[in-house]
Structure formats: C-alpha cells, structure tokens
Image (tube, rainbow, N blue to C red):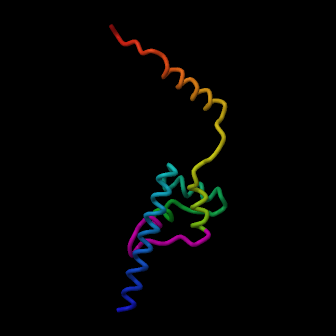
C-alpha cells in the first residue's frame, strides 16, 4: 500500500511540474521548439521532443534533470530590458494619436 502511495505522490509531482513548465513556456511566449532553442543557446542542448515529454503529465511524462530545469527557468524569465529608441518613439506617437480628436464620416 505504501508503494502505491509513493507512486501516486510521484505522479502528482510530475503533473505539477508538467503544468509549471507549460505555464512558464506559454507566459514567455515560446513554442516548445522556441524553448528548446533558447535552452540550447543558454548552453543546455535541448530538443522540442524533450520539452514535449516534460509537459506530458502521467506515466509517460519525464521530469527534466535539475540542470535542465534551472536553464528552463532562465529561458522563460521575462525580458527586462531597456526600451529602444524606436519603441520609445512608437509609444510617444501612440499617446499623441490617442489625444487627437476622432473625426468619423459625416
């Protein structure tokens, strides 16, 4: 009975990790292939099929090794970068356009 409980707890953890990986990937705006590419660029060679297997909950799903999971967390971090000149100009133009009176067809 205890063995069965351990298996159930392991499957529950596996499902939780699978949901976490899927959520992080989606929030980062990445496809499975995009996440694999980004992780590979960060020095942890990863394939799309590995990401897919991590996101499958249940018996067939796999959990990433600790090193891969750490890189996955880095790869899905939100980009906190300074605004480019072009982005600033676009933001200013959008604000100015919003202030213009709207003239519709008469």
Q: Is residue 81 left or right of residue 36?
A: right
Q: Is residue 12 magenta?
A: no
Q: Is residue 59 magenta?
A: yes
Q: Which quadrant of the figure contains the C terminus?
A: top left
Residue ID at (58%, 54%): 77
Foreground: 72 or 50? Answer: 72
Residue furthest left as drawn: 106
Span colored in magenta: 53-67
Residue furthest top as drawn: 106
Looking at the image, is 9 positioned above or below residue 95?
below
Looking at the image, is 7 positioned above or below residue 102?
below
Looking at the image, is 15 positioned above or below residue 99?
below
The spot of residue 16 in percent (x, y) is 43, 69
Prevailing secondary structure of the magenta residues: loop
The spot of residue 27 in percent (x, y) is 48, 52
Residue ID at (61%, 63%): 71
Residue 85 occupies quadrant: top right
The spot of residue 74 in percent (x, y) is 61, 58
């Amino acid at each position: 009975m205890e063995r069965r409980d351990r298996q159930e707890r392991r499957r529950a953890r596996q499902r939780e990790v699978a949901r976490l990986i899927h959520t992080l990937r989606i929030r980062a705006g990445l496809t499975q292939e995009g996440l694999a590419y980004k992780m590979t660029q960060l020095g942890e060679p990863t394939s799309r099929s590995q990401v897919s297997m991590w996101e499958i909950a249940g018996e067939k799903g796999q959990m990433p090794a600790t090193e891969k999971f750490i890189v996955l967390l880095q790869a899905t971090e939100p980009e906190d970068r300074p605004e480019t000149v072009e982005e600033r100009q676009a933001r200013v133009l959008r604000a100015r356009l919003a202030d213009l009176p709207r003239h519709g067809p008469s």
